[in-house]
Image: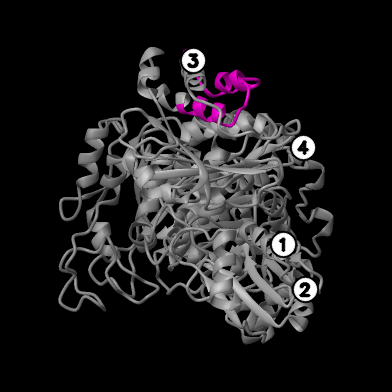
Amino acid sequence: MKYNVLIGGAAGLGIDTISILVEKILKRKGFFIYSNKDYMSRVRGGHNFIQVRFGTEPIYSHWPELDVIIALDKETVEFHAERLCAAGVIICDESLKIEYSRTVKAPLAQMAAEVKNPRALGSAAAGALLKIFGQNLELVKEVFIEKFERETAESNYHAFQLGYEYAPKYFEISAANKDSHILINGNAAIAMGALAGGVSFYASYPMTPATSIMTQLSMRQDDTGIVVEQVEDEISAINMALGASYAGVRAMTGTSGGGFALMVEALSLQGAMELPLVVVNSQRPGPSTGIATRTEQSDLDFVLTAGHGEFPRMVLAVRNPEDAFYQTARALNIADQYQVLVIILTDQYLADAAQTIEPFDYSRISIDRYFAEAKDIQGERYKRYMPTESGVSPRIIPGKIAGAVVLSDSHEHNEYGHISESAEIRTAMMNKRMKKLELLAQEIQEPEYFGVEKPDMLLLGWGSMQGPMREAVELLMQEGKPVGALVFGDLYPLPTKLLKKYAGTAKKLINIEQNFTGQLAKLIRQETGIFMNDSILNYNGRQLDSYTICSRLKKEVL
Amino acid sequence: MLDPRIYDVKDEISWCPGCGNYNILPSLKQALAELELQPHQVVIVSGIGQAAKTPHYMNANGFNGLHGRAVPPAQGMKIANKNLKVIIHSGDGDSYGEGGNHLLHGIRRNVDITHIVHNNQIYGLTKGQASPTTALGQKTTMQFDGNTSDPISPLALAVSIGCGFVARAFSGDKEHLVEIMKEAINYKGYALIDVLQPCIAFNKVNTFKWYKDRVYKIDDTSYDNSDRVAAFQKALEWGDNGIPLGVLYRQEKSTYFDRVSYLEEGPALVDRIWQPKDAERFMEDFR
């Protein structure tokens, strides 16, 4: 059993508040939740909406068909009514002129006036919604007490009750299990992974859709003793993070494509200095400013080679909030172990998509720093770039060992870090650094596979496409189609074992991506010589859902 | 006092013979030695340029980063380990041109670092183009018909945005330079020293003699360097009427560490004790 609710209206009308209430209440009642946001880059006006899917079994993605629309304005109905299912219901204020038979026209504004809080209109709508789904009032009041200050909590809860009393019951839904979940979105999960993984310093410049990572860290900096610094630009963000990393703390930065572009010179500095660094690129549609609040997967090509010269790096994409948590903590360890750059790709869809999942298992996380100590340093003078068999040189914390100084340089340098133009040293240093790619290749994780054992049709995707592709495979399997999907998390170095295994027997390989050029397909071709037979590409700024994937596959491929 | 020779390295120095940098380097070693700072307690940070080679010519921790980007990593490492003495050594192009934005915001952030600018009013490493402090109309190896932009007054800029320690020194007066460096390094907050320095290869206007004939030391007995308006006026003095040397402006103000109080009170960030389990409590926020 799954239901889908859309809450829509102009920016500033309070759809966020409604969705937080609805999501929290339904979650506490034990339902699985999946919500995603679709909003414009403006503070007031325009049209924004949030879709909240809930049900008694896990949900991995959004869905086009709607059961209920909460319309805070007329446009919401105009834009979305065609997606209402036959039994669908609209909730709106009685003042809206809406010609649709199954509309609950409640005096929401009047209810808000009655509780003397004009902003409580949304709470009244949330009350109506809960009643429509036949839920009781258990566990509801607590949500209001947590969300609002004391007085507003009372007025909002009162408005909720009025809305609840007014609305009829429309749906008969089965009871859920006891709630044991957390409800978290992709960016918050990255921030939680960073905290668990021991990040001490996060420097960043606000840019949608990466900003909320910084917000999630910043609200906890006092409590954890970490430093979150909002800097003057992304150039400063990454250079500051590198300075902090040099001094021995775990440092991280995050941005979106445009900010990442500004960081590129310093990515290369990381390569020369071999300082551990994790950079998040939360993608949005480009080119240039593009569409600030929409989603795309178009920076894979860019991040694979961003930075002048050649240096090793690891690129991974997070696939859902749970993955985002564990992979962020993992990225921090890999960066330290090999003194490399790890780039984490996410996107607006996943950044803002909240899902009910099991609480994170903190016993699975370790913080492994790999510092050398005084006894490990050979000879009289510390060699920051000492040649070793692995290519990784012993790294110490500057200032901690009397007599040992640490010199890091953006120029080609000798083993002490001093400028060198010697052909011999240059070759040795390049070999030393690039050798780490072999080590990284041993660290990589294979993509996740869903589907039948021997698929005829193999779908390939990455990152946030995981949820929609997983559901699409389920739908196609229900129809008896011999289909499977590989969804990549680690992208570079590219894991190829499962790819070769399934590609070897599948008749058709189809990449499904949120970009124009099929960037994963290109990477696979480049690394393995395997060509896709077809592709489903989407670059309208909105995430493909499983329904659309299936219908496009049938129309364009099958 | 330590022996300044502990800061020596054997590596070859690639500055031109006669370069003003040859006076600044030993002055820095002298200042650090007098302050009894050991090489491992100090980090010399730079961008790119002739002055920015300083980390290679000293036995100390060093970070020779990107052009214009000395200030951000310097702040990052000081925030990460407050026990380090972080000193930026870079040129006028690096500090006032490519890195101008970082200077502005570094001053605002007021992390406790010292920023020493080797100001020779020309680009040396790239062979003689105009820098942000080159005089209007001055002919260079690129501006054949004369520089078409006004020079900035770095000290007036620093005073105007509230830098708590603003000083000028001259590479030709080593003793004075050492004293200014010591005071700047001891100052709690962002300290800017603009060090006038002839470029014998590319700046034929602002020569050693040109500076020598114009610089004068501020009279500490009559000049109140805590007066910001007076300091701004002083900072604007330039050219044939005299160029003031000394601490033009000094004000004790809250530093970044005062503003992020747990950094000031607690251990250095690099010594923060933290386990993954310590973050588990935040799961409650998502229940």
Q: Quadrant of residue B267?
A: top right
Labelled disc at residue A541: none
Residue that numbered label 4 is attached to:
B277
Dot 3 alpha-carbon crowd within 10 angstroms: few under 14, some 14 to 19, many 20 or more: many
In the rendered structure, which amino acid carries the disc numbered 4? Lys
Q: Position of residue A313 (x, y in %)?
A: 64, 69
Mark 4 falls within which chain? B
Mark pair 1, 2: CA separation: 24 Å
Q: Are marks 1 and 3 in contact (CB under 8 Å)?
A: no
Residue that numbered label 3 is attached to:
A158
- Is residue A537 left or right of A115 when viewed as pictured? right
Q: Which residues are magenta?
A: A125-151
Mark 1 falls within which chain? A
Residue that numbered label 1 is attached to:
A478
Residue at the image position 39 percent from the left and 24 percent from the top: A108
Q: Secondary structure at mark 2?
A: helix
- Can residue A200 be seen from the camera position used here? no
Q: Position of residue A241 (x, y in %)?
A: 56, 52
In the rendered structure, which amino acid carries the disc numbered 1? Gln
4 and 1 marks on the same chain: no
Dot 2 alpha-carbon crowd within 10 angstroms: few under 14, some 14 to 19, many 20 or more: some
Q: Secondary structure at mark 1?
A: helix
1 and 3 marks on the same chain: yes
- Is residue A76 left or right of B132 when viewed as pictured? right
Q: Is residue A148 magenta?
A: yes
Dot 4 alpha-carbon crowd within 10 angstroms: few under 14, some 14 to 19, many 20 or more: some
Q: Are marks 2 and 4 in contact (CB under 8 Å)?
A: no
Q: Secondary structure at mark 4?
A: helix
